[in-house]
Image (cartoon, rainbow, N blue to C red):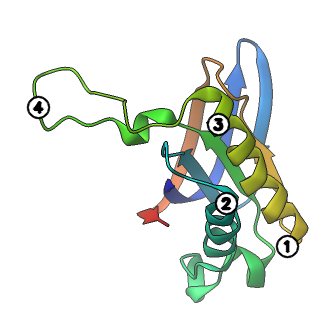
Amino acid sequence: MRAVAARVTRAKVTVGDEVTGALEEPGLLVLLGIHADDDQSKAATMARKLHELRILRDEQSCATAGAPLLVVSQFTLYGDTRKGRRPSFVAAARPEVAEPLVDAVVRELRARGASVATGRFGAMMAVESVNDGPFTLLIEV
């Protein structure tokens, strides 16, 4: 499981004309990719890592600051560009495997008390953000 977590002052994701998720205060924008071999245990680990990662201002985490997260599924995080000019996505989980695991990460975050907004799995989404710093990390579990 792989995530790109960006510290943001605000962010939103839109599908068509509908805003499906938004952060109106500082928090984390999380682009989440699921590997073909991932399972439920990785969902819990990723949720804990994202919630407790001390990358907000003053070394705060979403857990300590009560900051929200916007989680957006992104299979392209597993695009392999080492060969040729077209990325290969064979390492990315199939939608029927990935969607329940993205949902599991969101569910685990909410169970920890986090405020979580989301995109819409499989949809063509427009993601807007105002990075804070900028401060962006790649997280793998």
Q: Which residue is mark 1?
A: 112
Q: Nearer the viewer, mark 2 or mark 1?
A: 2
Which of marks 4 and 3 precedes in the sequence?
4
Q: Is residue 39 above or below residue 65?
A: above
For the point 77% across and 52% down, the residue is 104
Is any part of residue 135 visible from this angle?
no
Between the C-alphas of marks 4 and 1, the distance is 41 Å
| Horizontal side of residue 51 vs 85, given as left or right | right
Marks 4 and 2: in contact by CB < 8 Å? no
Residue type, mark 4 in image? Lys
Between the C-alphas of marks 2 and 4, the distance is 30 Å
Which of marks 2 and 3 precedes in the sequence?
2
Which of marks 1 and 2 precedes in the sequence?
2
Q: Position of residue 37 (x, y in %)?
A: 50, 49
Marks 1 and 3: in contact by CB < 8 Å? no
Of residues 40 and 74, the one drawn nearer to the viewer in this rendering: 40
Q: Position of residue 101 (x, y in %)?
A: 69, 47
Q: What's the mark number on residue 97? A: 3
Residue type, mark 2 in image? Ala
Residue type, mark 3 in image? Val
For the point 64% across and 84% down, the residue is 60
Marks 1 and 2: in contact by CB < 8 Å? no
Q: Which residue is mark 2?
A: 43
